[in-house]
Amino acid sequence: MFDVLEVTLPVFALVFCGYLASARSLLPRGAVEGINAFVFWFALPAMLFRVVGLRPITELLDLPFAGGFLLTGFTIFGLTYFLARKGVLAGTPRSAAEAPALGLNAAHGNGGYLGLALFAELGAQTLSTVALVLICDIFILITFTLLLLESAQTVEGVRRSRLAVIGSVMRSPMVASIGAGLLFSLSGLSLPPVAENFTRLLSAAAGPCALFAIGAALGGRALEVNREINALIVIKLLLHPLIAAIVLYGLLPVDPLAAAVGVVCATLPSASNSFILAQRYGVAVPSISASIVGGTALSVITVSLAIWVTGLR
């Protein structure tokens, strides 16, 4: 277990540094937005491109794993959606516009910012599976959630077309970098030395900056506790990895290393994407925001336990 903590504690210590800097107002105005912009538009896309593009495409075509992880995600999404609509989570039923945002919050872990940085410390052999997790979450789960949100409500008086929604997702730098990486991997080419060094430098900055940015973004949010917030945290940190373990280890013929990565990815706290979408559509913002803060704080325990139990360290 001490070997696991040697990896996880420094990772979460960087998150705490960002939280402390923001909470203590050590950062100048606009600094958090600037750090996030650098990570979102430059560093993280470079890392994703290298993770996907510099590997043989066969490493990214693990269909049993992708099917199992998607089955797990949609099971958690559907369960949370059902409980929200029936009023089990909050005590009162949530609307058809609110339930999809809560479902995404419970099913979509922070694989981009936190996951990539964490697994980079656990070994490069795990990163292609993490990239596949991101492909499943970003290309399928988030798009599905957006379609439900758009179907449930009108934005600024005009309902956007399904193609417009999908187009906005596809223009995300994370999606674009994964797509570019897939094409580059298919080409069989190698990066010129200048491009190799440039993307390597940017990629190296992604992990530390992303972890600091997570904490800095959380530093301005209040930590709240209520029935719904507690339920969302329990579903994300405990039920999600439990279902992932059942599916990936028991139901499908998944490689043991990939299964272990999938279980740990399921243990990651909710991604900020669910908060961004909740804000965009004005649905369940307080609960989703608070569950991200609380889940991130507690995930140092659950993630460490998951790494230890699965034998990744």
Image (cartoon, helix red, strand yellow):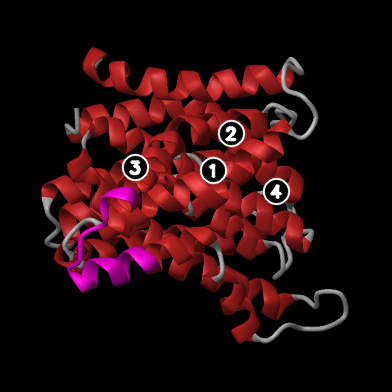
Q: Please state which amino acid type lies under the numbered disc 2.
A: Ala
Residue bounds of the magenta highlight: 180-194
Is the magenta region chiefly helix, strand or loop?
helix
First of labels 3, 4 by sequence position: 4
Look at the numbered discs 3 and 2 and tell me whether their residues touch, using CB distance below 8 Å: no
What residue sits right under mark 1 in the picture? 39
First of labels 2, 1 by sequence position: 1
First of labels 3, 1 by sequence position: 1
Residue 90: image tag: 4
Q: Left or right? Give the position of 5 relative to 158.
A: left
What residue sits right under mark 3 in the picture? 200
Q: Please state which amino acid type lies under the numbered disc 3.
A: Arg
Q: Secondary structure at mark 3?
A: helix
Percent position (x, y) of residue 53?
A: 28, 60
- Callout in the foreground (4, 2): 2
Residue 266: image tag: none
